[in-house]
Structure formats: structure tokens, C-alpha cells
Amino acid sequence: MKKSTYILLLVFSLMFASCESELDLPSQASINAESNTTVKDVDAMVIGIYNKMLKVSNYEYMNHMFPMFLADNLKGISVAWFQINNAMKHEVPSGDILLNYMYYPQYEAINRCNNVIKQEVATPAQKSAAYYCRALSHLRLYDVFGAVPFIKEDYVIDTPVAPLTDAQLLEAIAEDLRFASEHGADFDTSDRAESYSGVTKFAAKALLARVYRLQGKIADAGKVAEEVITSGKFELASNPAENLGEMIFQFTGTIKDGSRIGNLMSIGTYGWNCFSASDDLVALIQGDDTRSNVFNKEVKNGNEYFFPTKYKTNIDASVIISRLSEMYLISAEAGNANRLTEFQAVRKSSLSLENERRLELCFEAGIRWEDIKLSGKDDYTLPYPDAATSSNPLLKRP
């Protein structure tokens, strides 16, 4: 089989694969023993993973924003979709069509990751990128659905898979991230935009620190966070609106990729689905706090609204995953009090650690919703989609 033919088969298998299996996963592309797949071919497959992670589905902004709807940092100015209102009220029915867009596309991304992991020719860095993305997709599922099946590269098509418990799922995610942190590419500070747009060992360490925290392993979380901080690769920005030196990893896209996160969190979608920062979030900005630089005030019909500017409305469609500031706050929580002092000196703030996390990390990768659940303030999870429970008899809450 020629390499070009193989790539086409891979693309079409991912685009048109059936969801008729017990797990409703797309068919995994078969690799012909004579295909002579090269490292360059695997590079194309990794790019395909990144593209899927950024544009998860036709409603990709729902995937990226759903944890925000479940949390408390957004205020709905105008909400056209009743499904979003249901999410904000924690009253999502199992027949909600948006659940399908939340559930299945993440497994499609996981399938792409597993196809890379299975390639014998794949380099350690390429496999690390796939392990990282597989971990992140499972984490995104965990954030909103709680316990879900964890799908590895040896999954057999049409085999029912039961969900892992929360603890088992987080440990499986952590295992993937440990591999990625040990074998991932280094972060090249001479080309930051290139480095933070691809998975490096530090992207894996940053996400691993977050997962350790979710597991209750705060000492381990602090240790890994310190490895990122002391690497010398990143630095806190005096102006958080210009944070390239803080960025550890993001999925970088252009406006044609259609993320629309920034668009929905701007006055531009007023009258459709439009969201501003919640009043109590904005109230955390006090005195000379430099984070006032990442909010814009708009007046509409005599009302003032504050919109976050972390996601541009007309320039790019990037999705932030990890920044250095999170590592400082995790390290502080692990007992390194000097890290909180250093962080607050740069941000010119004096909030509690909980509120520092809420303000600093708002609208980033589901972190606020994870914090709410971890604190015990809420334990809501989305129901599994009806179609998934109908096709997979093992898909039941552990």
C-alpha cells in the first residue's frame, strides 16, 4: 500500500467511521504491514490529533466551554440554546443532543492517539504527544461525565467496555502523562510559539501536576510543579495580557478553525449565545491587580459587562491548556508559601489561594469546574448520552 493511500484511508476512516460498535467508537484504521509508514507519516497523524483536539466537533466551542457552563465564572447575557441553560442549571437530560457532541468526538480524538501509539516507527516524542492528548481527552470526559471508559491502543472493536471509577480513571490518565513527561520533546525557548503549540515534556508535567492535585496527591503535584517552575523555561509576566513567557501549552489555531470561544465571550454575539464574566469573579479584581488587563468593559442597553480577553474574537482560535501561573499556585497549595508570595508580588494581589486560582485560571481548560468539584461544593456530572448507554450495556455508573 502506498503511503499516500494509507494517509487517505486514515483520514476517511476517521471521518466516516461507523458508531455502531458497543462503545460507539469509530473504526481504527488498519495499518498494512507493507505500507512502509515513515516518521513523516506519523507527523501528519500527530497534526491530525492536534486538529481534532482543537476542532473537536461541529460544535467545538461547546466542548471547550461546557465545563465553564457548569461552573460559576460565566454570566449568561443572552442564551439562545435551552441546552446551555440546562447545563448552567445542572439539569441536563440524558437525551440532550449536545451530549453526543461532548462524548463521541473525544473518543474519536482518542482513537487518533491510539493509532499513533501503535506505530512502531513513531519516535518517543511523537508517542508522547499521542499519550498526552489521549490523557487530555479522557480528562475532558472526566470533567463533565465523571467515570468513563478508558480506551487504550489494544482496544478491540465491538467489545463493550465498562467505565473506570474516578480514582482508576485519574490514575490511568496520570500514567499516560508520566510517559509523556519522561519521553516528550524539550521546550525550545528560542521559538516559544512553536514550542507551546506542540506537546513537550513540560506540557505533560504541567497537566500531570493538575491531575495529581485532582487525585489528592498534593505533595506529588507540588513536586512536579516545581520541576516546571525551576526549569528556567518560563516566567511570570508583569502584564498577564502579554503572557507568552508563561505559556506552557495551547492548541494553536486560526479563526478558520472556528473555535469561537472568544466570540461567545464578547459583545459580538449579543442576542444569540453571549456570556460575560460573572459579577463575583470581576469583584475579585481589587486595587492595582494587573489582571484587570485581561477584561474589557462593554456597555449594552445601559448595563455594564466585563468580557475576558484570553481568547481573541477575530484573530485566532487557540485554546489555552497550561500556563506557569497554575504551577505557582499548585506549588503554593503543596506548602511552598514563597511561591504564593512571589506570584502575588507580580500580580499585585492579596487574595486567598482559592480566589487567586479562580481569578488567575478563569476560563482555562475546565479548571474552575474541577476546583468546585474537588472542594466538595458540587458533584454534578452530565448523564451518559442515551445512544451510548443503549449501545454499550456496560456503560453504567461504577
Image (cartoon, helix red, strand yellow):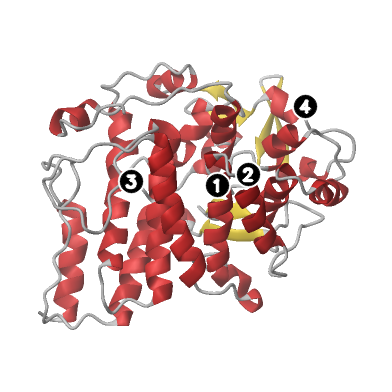
Mark 2 Cα shell of 10 Å, populated few (<14), some (14-19), many (≥20): many
Q: Is residue 9 left or right of residue 115?
A: left
Give the residue type at disc 2: Ile
Which label lies toward us, 2 or 4? Answer: 2
Give the residue type at disc 3: Gln
**Of helix, strand and loop, which one carries label 3?**
helix
**Of helix, strand and loop, which one carries label 4?**
loop
Is residue 376 positioned above or below 117 on the image? Answer: above
Q: Find residue 171 and report its horizontal and vertical position in percent.
A: 43, 47
Which of the two labelled residues, at mark 3 and mark 4, occupies the earlier sequence position?
A: 3
Give the residue type at disc 1: Tyr
Where residue 218 is drawn, which disc sits there? 2
Q: Quadrant of the C terminus?
A: top left
> Which quarter of the picture shows residue 275?
top right
Residue at which label 3 appears: 106
Q: Find residue 131 and report its horizontal and vertical position in percent.
A: 39, 61
**Callouts 3 and 4 close, C-beta under 8 Å:** no
Which of the two labelled residues, at mark 1 and mark 3, occupies the earlier sequence position?
A: 3
**C-alpha span from label 3 to label 4:** 35 Å
Q: Is residue 341 left or right of residue 249?
A: right
Residue at which label 4 appears: 283
Residue at which label 1 appears: 212
Which label lies toward us, 1 or 4? Answer: 1
**Callouts 2 and 4 close, C-beta under 8 Å:** no
**Callouts 2 and 1 close, C-beta under 8 Å:** yes
Residue drawn at (26%, 22%) of the image: 95
**C-alpha span from label 2 to label 1:** 6 Å
Give the residue type at disc 4: Ala
Is residue 88 positioned above or below 334 on the image? Answer: above
> Which quarter of the picture shows residue 20?
top left
